[in-house]
């Protein structure tokens, strides 16, 4: 029987986020005690928790979330495990030696940092993609790259001034979506059918998402 695995992080107070964006705020506006109903107001950045980067995030005329084909968000995906303890690059050779991918597939990359979510190092010392890995993903025709890190680019603590975000620009410039902050431990080295339920934000450069993997167990 197929089994569905939740790959996403809950939106919650105190969750890790890049220092370049604000912390999320969750404010009750109606309560059970006062109103016999519950309503909450969310004040969240578009790039927090498990979320999708639309091309417009780093491409001036790139597609916004509401312009992204929904077929990009559903389909075959493989999760490769490339475990890293330190902020070292994952190269094209690391990726293409593991499995044969076809154009239109999604590739999820588990570095093991989904087990370090909440640690200070999660923001500042995570592994990242080498630019040649991003170029290989584009050349292969992958529709989506997902990782269990806060960014596929160099960690914030290692970025020089005027950091160019080459990995983001390479992937998004080709229309290859990016999903960050995934939880991939249950699907490592497996194929699945991936569903990315990203918020359909008009003009959105990105938005939180519920990512689900269906496994044929």
Image (spheres, grey):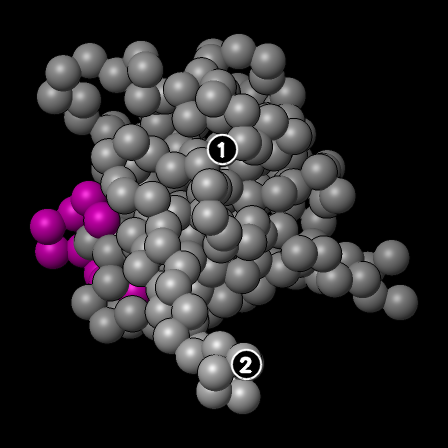
Report the predominant secondary structure element of the magenta stretch: loop
Q: Quadrant of residue 95?
A: top right
Give the number of the disc on residue 99.
none
Q: For the point 38% across and 64% down, which residue is it?
A: 27
Q: Position of residue 178 (x, y in %)?
A: 40, 46
Give coordinates of residue 143: x percent, y percent: 44, 53
> Circle 1 — which element?
loop
Asked if residue 165 lies left or right of residue 23, the reply is: left
Element marked by disc 2: helix
Q: Which residues are magenta?
A: 57-65
Instruction: Say whether residue 143 is magenta.
Output: no
The residue beneath circle 2 is: 32
**Which quadrant: the N terminus?**
bottom right
Query: Which quadrant, please, contains the C terminus?
Result: bottom right
Q: Quick check: 172 above or below 85? A: below
> Which residue reaches farthest front?
34
Describe residue 148's horizontal placement relative to residue 14 as left or right. Answer: right
Q: Magenta segment: does it hold 58?
A: yes
Image vertical order of residue 167 relative to residue 138, above or below: above
Image x and y of residue 73, in percent? 48, 63
Q: Which residue is mark 1?
A: 149
Density class for disc 2 (Cα within 10 Å; few <14, some 14-19, many ≥20) is: few
Tell whether 76 sits left or right of 204: right
* Quadrant of the rendered image containing residue 78: top right
Residues at marks 1 and 2, CA–CA distance in whole angstroms = 37 Å
Can residue 84 be seen by looking at this rendering?
Answer: yes
Please give the name of the residue rendered at 50% of the width and 66% of the height, measured from the top-left corner.
Answer: 197
Provide residue 179's location: percent of width, then percent of height: 45, 47
Q: Is residue 50 or residue 138 the one in the foreground?
A: 50
Question: For the residues carrying marks 1 and 2, which lies nearer the camera in this image?
Answer: 2
């Amino acid at each position: 029987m197929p089994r569905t695995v939740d790959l996403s992080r809950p939106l919650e107070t105190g969750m890790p986020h890049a220092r370049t964006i604000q912390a999320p705020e969750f404010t009750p506006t109606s309560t059970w005690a006062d109103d016999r109903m519950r309503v909450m107001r969310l004040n969240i950045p578009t790039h927090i928790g498990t979320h999708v980067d639309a091309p417009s995030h780093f491409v001036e005329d790139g597609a916004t979330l509401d312009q992204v084909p929904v077929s990009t968000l559903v389909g075959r995906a493989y999760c490769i495990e490339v475990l890293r303890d330190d902020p070292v690059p994952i190269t094209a050779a690391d990726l293409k030696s593991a499995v044969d991918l076809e154009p239109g597939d999604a590739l999820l990359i588990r570095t093991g940092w989904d087990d370090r979510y909440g640690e200070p190092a999660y923001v500042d010392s995570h592994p990242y993609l080498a630019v040649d890995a991003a170029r290989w993903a584009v050349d292969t025709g992958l529709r989506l790259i997902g990782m269990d890190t806060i960014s596929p680019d160099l960690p914030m603590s290692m970025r020089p001034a005027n950091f160019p975000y080459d990995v983001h620009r390479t992937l998004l410039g080709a229309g290859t979506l990016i999903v960050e902050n995934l939880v991939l431990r249950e699907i490592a080295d497996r194929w699945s059918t991936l569903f990315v339920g990203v918020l359909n934000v008009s003009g959105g450069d990105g938005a939180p998402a519920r990512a689900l993997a269906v496994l044929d167990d």
